[in-house]
């Protein structure tokens, strides 16, 4: 049985007995080799971790920093948005925003509004100062993967796995629906607000002229999914990051490649350009954050930033610091500096809770999903295969893999060689959860909870 792309994509139901989670891609075949650090004498933009924000209890998908640099918003798998005061490092608000994962955030140029996109198919507009819901945008028929606010702050764009981009006004009225080539995973307006760039599942970048809502160009940009797009403040350059482990810098006027940046060993989830357009920061599933010279396409620094996948990065408006958010449930703030002596980090809240002894809510199941994903990711690092493999994996509540059952002949053929260990016989159905695991020859993993514990 050869699984198609949608075969593991179930309805987004956040409940105890049925929970869907689409975990970020990971390349199994490639080792976690990191680019060596460059000495401070070779450049003047090394970074030091300055602060760690702790408060989320499941992995974080998105961060955005307000134009005044005082507020940071973060969105996580459990549907919550947290608002942080960057001057004090304190959590200001925790909002139960969506009924499923918050994958994308954008803050308006005037700092008044926050837009969120979720797997619950909704786009929501929030008052950033009060945390109050202003408007709910309904129209997408599948997960919302990307949101962006136009430079004038008057329109919002949202991209979805329903293969459409919708343009909205702030009152929630749809102004246009753009049919894209595939799942839309990334969006970015040009600084003049005349064009919108979209990144798709098929590796293409679309350039849309907003005046007449027409796609004027499709670029076959990457050999795999385009996860992220960032346009420089002057509009001359844009960057794209992909599952193919590369970042590409483009001449926006000529739509030609300036540089292909290699160094990440896994999916590039997020890229962001500095306010002066000279520096690019990228975050990857390889757990690192990398700093690049945007004009020369050279690697400046590599930070072993997090213990798990780096999902999102964002620059402060003054360009003096940037944030990275991770599946390890933390946000780190990095200060741009001219030296490389690390400073100690300060933890601003209690350590995230460990998995409870009994799974009684969706958060526990989500945490177990992440533990399983990390185990699979590590175990299959060196495995080579040519066909899609599907398994049903049984996991004990303490995170130990109990058994795995092949769901197709290819998976059964490879069962003898599978590196998953610590197998044991199930003792009680109440102590186990079952997950759907799909492994792709490209090196990508998808882990989806099948069903969990019953009370």
Image: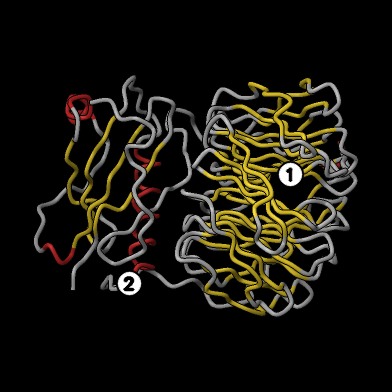
Q: Secondary structure at mark 1?
A: strand
Q: Quarter of the image holding residue 54?
A: bottom right
Q: Earlier in the sequence, mark 2 or mark 1?
A: 1
Expressed as whole percent of the image width and height from the top left, the position of residue 446 reads 38, 41
The quadrant of the image that shows the C terminus is: bottom left
The residue located at (25%, 55%) in the rendering is 400
User: Of tags 2 and 1, which is closer to the observer?
Assistant: 2
Query: Which residue is under mark 1?
Result: 281
Visible in this render: residue 109? Answer: yes
The quadrant of the image that shows the N terminus is: top left
Expressed as whole percent of the image width and height from the top left, the position of residue 251 reads 83, 26
Seen from the viewer's position, the closer of residues 16 and 335 is 16
Mark 2 crowdedness (10 Å alpha carbons): few <14, some 14-19, many ≥20:
some
Q: Is residue 268 above or below residue 323?
A: above
The residue located at (74%, 77%) in the rendering is 129
> In this rendering, would 211 be left or right of 327?
right
> In this rendering, would 27 be left or right of 367?
right
> In this rendering, would 172 be left or right of 22?
right
Residue 361: which disc?
Answer: 2
Q: Quarter of the image holding residue 213?
A: top right
């Amino acid at each position: 049985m050869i699984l198609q792309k949608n075969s593991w994509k179930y309805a987004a139901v956040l409940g105890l007995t049925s929970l869907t989670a689409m975990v970020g891609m990971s390349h199994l075949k490639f080792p976690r080799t990191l680019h060596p650090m460059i000495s401070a004498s070779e450049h003047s933009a090394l970074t030091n971790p300055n602060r760690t924000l702790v408060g989320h209890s499941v992995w974080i998908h998105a961060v955005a920093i307000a134009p005044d640099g005082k507020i940071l918003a973060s969105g996580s798998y459990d549907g919550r948005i947290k608002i942080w005061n960057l001057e004090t490092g304190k959590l200001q608000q925790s909002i139960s925003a969506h009924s499923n994962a918050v994958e994308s955030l954008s803050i308006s140029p005037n700092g008044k509004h926050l837009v969120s996109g979720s797997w619950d198919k909704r786009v929501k507009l929030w008052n950033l100062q009060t945390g109050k819901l202003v408007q709910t945008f309904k129209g997408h028929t599948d997960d919302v993967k990307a949101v962006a606010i136009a430079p004038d702050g008057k329109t919002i764009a949202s991209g979805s796995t329903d293969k459409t981009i919708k343009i909205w006004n702030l009152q929630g009225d749809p102004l246009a629906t753009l049919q894209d080539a595939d799942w839309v995973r990334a969006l970015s307006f040009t600084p003049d607000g005349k064009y919108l760039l979209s990144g798709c599942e098929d590796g293409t970048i679309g350039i849309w002229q907003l005046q007449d809502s027409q796609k004027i160009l499709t670029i076959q940009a990457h050999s795999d999914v385009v996860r992220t797009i960032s346009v420089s403040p002057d509009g001359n350059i844009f960057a794209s990051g992909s599952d193919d482990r590369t970042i590409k810098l483009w001449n926006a006027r000529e739509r030609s490649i300036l540089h292909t940046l290699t160094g990440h060993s896994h999916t590039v989830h997020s890229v962001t350009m500095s306010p002066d357009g000279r520096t690019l920061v990228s975050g990857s599933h390889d757990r690192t954050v990398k700093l690049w010279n945007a004009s020369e396409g050279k690697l400046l620094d590599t930070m072993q930033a997090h213990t798990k996948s780096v999902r999102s990065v964002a620059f402060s408006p003054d360009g003096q610091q940037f944030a990275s958010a991770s599946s390890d449930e933390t946000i780190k703030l990095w200060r741009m500096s001219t030296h490389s002596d690390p400073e100690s980090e300060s933890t601003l809240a209690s350590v995230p809770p460990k998995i409870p002894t009994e799974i009684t809510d969706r958060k526990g199941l989500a945490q177990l999903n992440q533990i399983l994903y990390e185990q699979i990711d590590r175990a299959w690092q060196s495995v080579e295969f040519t066909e899609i493999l599907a398994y049903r994996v049984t996991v004990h509540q303490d995170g130990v893999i109990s058994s795995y059952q092949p769901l197709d002949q290819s998976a059964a053929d490879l069962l003898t060689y599978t590196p998953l260990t610590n197998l044991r016989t199930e003792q009680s159905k109440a102590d186990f959860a079952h997950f759907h695991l799909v492994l792709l020859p490209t090196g990508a993993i998808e882990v989806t909870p099948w069903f969990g514990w019953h009370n």
